[in-house]
Image: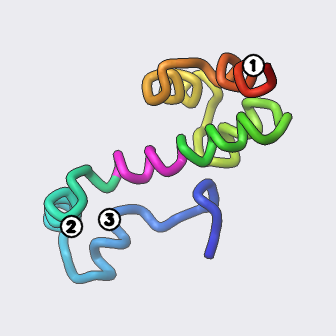
Amino acid sequence: MSEIGDAKPSIKTVAEEQGYSQPQFSRLFSDAFGVSPLRYRDGKRLFQAREMVKDTLLPFRDIAESVGYGDYPTFSKAFRRRFGASPDQVRRRRRA
């Protein structure tokens, strides 16, 4: 199985493969898991990124790219919104 940041089929593609329209699939997914497919995917990406921030010394831009963010500012904003701290703050706390 590929990593979170690897090229993945779109939600539309997954929905069609399962015989649903994208809105149907999103609704069923949300009903089953309590979160939209996009929020679920973003959460998985950010939790993977947080582990990389804590456990490696990779540059943050490389981490952002490896989990599927196209640019660092978008990644940093999402990371801060999710965890209440920047990637740098999380790394410094881990190293302290």
Residue 92 is tagged as 1
Q: Which residues are magenta?
A: 38-45
Q: Secondary structure at mark 2?
A: helix
User: Can residue 82 be found in the magenta stretch?
Assistant: no
Disc 3: which residue = 12
Distance CA(mark 1)–CA(mark 2): 40 Å
Q: Amino acid at mark 1?
A: Arg
Q: Which residue is mark 2?
A: 25
Measure the C-alpha gap from mark 3 to mark 2.
8 Å
| Residue located 54% across and 44% down the image | 47
Of labels 3 and 2, earlier in sequence is 3
Q: Locate residue 21 relative to residue 60 in the image: left or right.
A: left
- Badge 3 density bin: few <14, some 14–19, many ≥20, Cα 10 Å: some
| Quarter of the image where the N terminus is located | bottom right
The three-letter code of the residue at mark 2 reads Phe
SS assignment at label 3: helix
